[in-house]
Image (cartoon, helix red, strand yellow):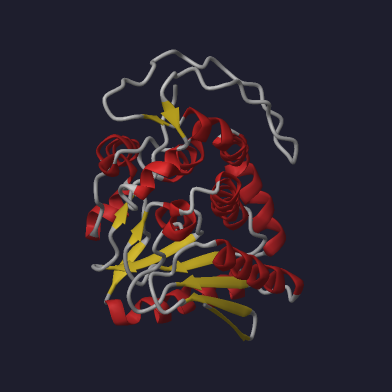
Amino acid sequence: MLECDVDGAIATVTLDDGKANALSPVMQREINYALDLAEQQEMRAVVLAGNDRLFCGGFDLGVLAAADQQATLDMLRGGFRLSVRLLMFPSPVIIAATGPAIAISSFLLLSGDHRVGSARTRCQAKEVATGMTLPMSAVEIMRMRLTPPAFHRGIAMACRFVGDAAIAGGWLDEIIEPSDVVSRAHEEAETAAATVNLEAHLASKVKARGGAVEAILRGIDRLARESRAGNVVAGCRTSRRSHGSLLLRVGCRRARAPAASCRSVRPWWENSLRQVNHLWISYC
């Protein structure tokens, strides 16, 4: 499911489950374990790569279809916490986007320090196109890394970004031939390992990204609330009542969530039984 290779001061983590590289709970654990090893061995750079088909295929639809509320929430939280970990990783993270980066994988892509892709790398927050409202964690990741036009088009229109548009919008840093994506990512990792002062690197990332990361963590705390609000059953309208502001403490403590205000609601992942590609998230 995952390979972790060490070459000098660089660790390469390759996602390859033989299928779609779904960000399942097992895949999340393996990625975190590989990152733990990279930290313990004080690697000076990390390359995170997909397989020959794609970078990452999104969350595990099998978990979503099982309609186990706690398992689904744990998987979602784990995915966004992984983004936070990459954003604040103590050494440079170079992502080799070997293929499409859709939904949660697009947010992981945005969490790297340098992103290498090819003409095959389609970057897309697909949620709106499949009937869901983006969770706040995803919105904050996109807000931090994308240009304002790409941010709004990506969220409201579920636009696909490829080629030069992906670079201009902030999804990727460079595009090369598909066969060279991983090797180019290694070149960038070698340069970073040789030139970047890790203490200054981390301190600067904390200064630059600290506010955004706090907002992402607040979004993670809200995932249970968002899922309880769910999406209304077909034929009913979603309430437009404003939630107002929440003062949430960033950290391990979870915010208390008010009861959902819509009358006809169901956990949004139950709708995935009808259409497994849909992750229904909506505010009530």
Furthest residue in direction bottom, as rendered: 7
The image shows residue 203 at horizontal and vertical percentages of 69, 51
Q: Quadrant of residue 167 in the image? A: bottom left
Q: Quadrant of residue 97 in the image? A: bottom left
The image shows residue 176 at horizontal and vertical percentages of 29, 73
Compared with 102, 31 (above or below) is: below
Foreground: 264 or 259?
264
Residue at position x 32%, y 75% in the image: 53
Do we see residue 219 in this rendering? no
Foreground: 53 or 194?
53
Q: In the image, is 2 to the left or to the right of 44?
A: left
Q: In the image, is 243 to the left or to the right of 180?
A: right
For the C terminus, the quadrant is top left
The image shows residue 51 at horizontal and vertical percentages of 40, 77
Residue at position x 60%, y 78% in the image: 11
Compared with 246, 221 (above or below) is: below
